[in-house]
Image (tube, helix red, strand yellow):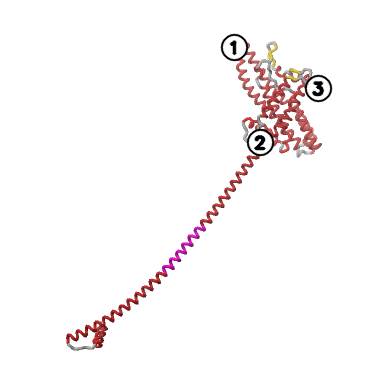
Amino acid sequence: MPQIAQIVETYASQIFWLLVTFGLIYFVIGRAMLPRIQATVESRDGKIADDIAAAHKAHAEADETEAAYRARIDAARAAAQKATQEAKAEAARDAEVRVKAADAELAAKIAEADTRIAAAQAEALAGIAEVAAEAAQDIVSKVSGATVSRDEAAGAVAAALANG
Amino acid sequence: MAAEGGKIDPMHQFLIEPLFGRTWEIAGYNIAFTNSALFMVVTLACIWLFMLGGMKRELVPGRWQAAVEGCTGFIANMMHANIGPKGKAFTPYVFSLFMFILVANLVGMLPLGIVPGLHAFTVTSHLTVTGVLAIITFAIVLIVGFGKHGLHFFSLFVPQGTPMLMVPLLFVIELFSFLVRPFSLGLRLFVAMTAGHILLKVLAGFVISGANAGIGTALIVSIPSFVLMIGITLLELLVCAIQAYVFALLASLYLNDAINLH
């Protein structure tokens, strides 16, 4: 086995070159290059973590905005409903008032018309009595030749009218 | 693989040959640039190129960057799961360990033998290499353990809720198991890689010897061996990754003992 047979003659050279090459690997690659590669990995991990945190934050903000929007929409809807109800109530009140005014006006007109009808009726009735009295005077004078006074004729007409 | 006198030597692949700088010395020690050193440098270059593709630092990673980040994230998660936030300081070390072992294992599996004059060499199949990695890991565990907790670190060897009578016995057992750690760590990787490569080379030897012996032997020996080799190669690729993972996992668990005690 050359590893053991040659050990005495070669160990110095082996150890020397191993220390040189392994030393270079340790100092140049292990201590200089490795930390920079690790730093790249770490910065990437950090960036990914930051991005995820930012995304979570944005998500939460979006949720908040949506909640605020919902609340405002609800408030606006409630306000609109209230305004509608108020307008409806007001319109109903208004209509009632106007209907009452119209009713009063109509009642006044009806009352006036009634009085006018009553007056006209009375006038007409008075006219009938007078005409009847005149007619009775004429009829009496033509039938009997007697002359009746106007008052007698009127009294007879009134008695006949009263008897129906 | 070398055919010496018609025989195929499955151990030849582990042979260390100086490529240049045979006379280089530091304090009397020869530090020739060997094929082993070459494959360490190749491993280094592969890891560096791989990591370079992950340095674009884009917010949305491309395929390559995602692959690199997968590797770093794998080790970082393992450290976090086994040690906790304090493990971050040791992530570079465990990551270097994991990548070095993984890439060295995989580079050693490359079929470079197809190209004449090239031989794939598995750095991690050498006890010297795995031993040094294990010793460095164990040294870090000791330094961190004693540096953080002082002599209180010895309480690691007394599990919580141990009856007083049992403390001395358990202390010895736990201490022994603790001291065995660097050996088990280094030997496990060395043995796994060596055994797998020897098995592959032995089977490859069967394929070649059977084919040379004639058509009948080729049918009986070479083809089944070749089919088996495909399976073993896939298994070896799995072992490459598993051994790297096991080494890194155990290093993180041992560091956890040193950092958090219990």
Foreground residue among B87 and B29: B29
Per the image, label 3 sits on a secondary structure element best described as strand
Q: Which quadrant does the C terminus of chain A fall into?
A: bottom left
Q: Is residue B72 visible?
A: yes
Kind of residue sitting beneath label 3? Ile
Q: Chain of mark 1?
A: B
Left or right? Give the position of A53 relative to B148.
left
Residue B212 % position (x, y): 63, 11
Within 10 Å of disc 2 (Cα), the crowding (few <14, some 14-19, many 20+) is: many
Q: Which residue is mark 3?
A: B26
Residue at figure coordinates x 72%, y 30% from the top left: A28
Residue B60 % position (x, y): 62, 35
Foreground residue among B47 and B199: B47
What is the quadrant of residue B10 in the picture?
top right
Q: Which residue is mark 2?
A: A41
Q: Is residue B249 visible?
A: no
| Residue B5 circle label | none
Left or right? Give the position of A66 relative to A17.
left
Residue B73 % position (x, y): 67, 34
Q: Which residues are magenta?
A: A78-100
Q: Which residue is mark 1?
A: B215
Asked whether disc 1 touches disc 3, contact meaning CB atoms under 8 Å apart, the reply is no
Tell if the residue under mark 3 belongs to the same chain as the one under mark 2: no
Q: Chain of mark 3?
A: B
